[in-house]
Amino acid sequence: RRYGEEPGVQILVSLLIPFAAYLAAERLHCSGILAAVAAGITMSYAELSGQALAITRVRRNAVWDTVQYTANGLIFIILGEQLPAIFSRAATTVREADHLEPWWLVLYVVVVALALVVLRFLWVWASLELTLFRAGRSGEKPLRPSWRLLAAGTFAGVRGAITLAGILTLPLSMPDGGAFPARDLAIFIAAGVIVLSLVIASLALPPLLSGYDLMPEPSEAEQENRARRVASDAAIRAIERVQHEMAEGRGDADIYAAAAARAMALYRLRSGDQVATEEEAQLSKQVDNIAIRLRIAGLRAERTEIFRLARSGELEDAVARRIVRELDLMEARYT
């Protein structure tokens, strides 16, 4: 609060927090994976405080997107590298359990996958019933979806990275130094269930949703427009307050008034942008989309010219990079 904020430090801290939560949980003989997930959820709630600088959020999101993509890929690469040896040791574990044939591994995977399908269906059904019950108590009359949509919700959304990360953290040995029992069998079953779930979803979803008219999603346009109007009103009040503070006691106060009027123009337009009919709303959205495409075309032309000036030596590299970054951020906002 007193000395400002260095984005690099904040990003580094955000990267270290999940590791710290994991190590602390493991030290306390708890689940490190669940602790890291809980830390991530806590960080998302802390983000709502709005204390971080805008530039910190932009850079941190870019870093975390890269880390997340890389980590999701690495977990499956590690599994693939270890899978042949894991299968061999898992088959050995099955033989020691008096199941002489390795095909029992396939049976284990199928049984666990089917159990997960049943649990997912029960969870989707219970969640839907609770949602309909709450909507009925509030006076709404929502449509009840058919079993096809419930089944689609059961098979959709299959994820495997968290499962693999959790199963791979099983210790290699017990406290007495002996090997952790059936570790390779557990890893093989987890990997097999993930692959089988993906295959089932790929095969089941197309026929389930073929010819099915999906229920209309609740529109968030009204909520978004109201939020933008409220935020614009707050921006106008803040600009007026700061403008009066800056111009107080100065002989060129009219300059500050003109600057404030220019800054408030967009906010006043947004604050008063209320449409009366659905046709007007569609027309306004169409105009906005056209304007965005025109702005993007202008930004790309600007950037092309900046690159040309930098290549010809008419513009210093540092200045060119700064201008291009501003243009990139504006284009990212529209796209």
Image (cartoon, rainbow, N blue to C red):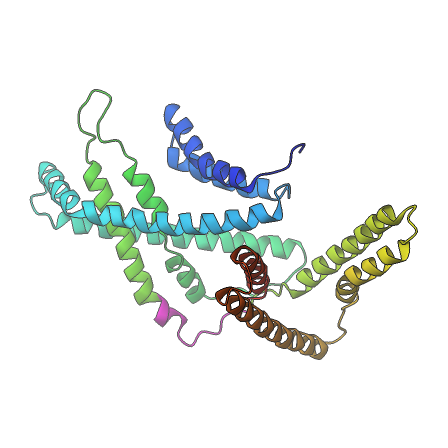
Instruction: Determine whether 41 is above or below 58 in the image.
Output: above
Q: Is residue 210 magenta?
A: yes
Q: In the rendered structure, which segment of residues is drawn in magenta?
A: 205-216
Q: Residue at x 33, y 42 (%)?
A: 165
Residue 267 image point, x, y percent = 76, 61
Residue 167 image point, x, y percent = 29, 40
Residue 292 image point, x, y percent = 61, 72
Depth check, front residue: 255 or 14 = 255
In what quadrant of the picture does the C terminus appear? bottom right
Residue 111 seen from this side:
no
Q: Residue furthest front?
A: 313
Instruction: Determine whether 203 is above or below 136 in the image.
Output: below
Instruction: Determine whether 105 is above or below 28 in the image.
Output: below
Q: 229 left or right of 71?
A: right
Q: 174 left or right of 274?
A: left
Depth check, front residue: 44 or 187 = 44
Residue 291 seen from this side:
yes
Q: Residue at x 39, y 60 (%)?
A: 156
Location of residue 270 by image quarter:
bottom right
Residue 172 image point, x, y percent = 22, 31
Q: Is residue 261 magenta?
A: no
Q: Residue at x 55, y 42 (%)?
A: 7
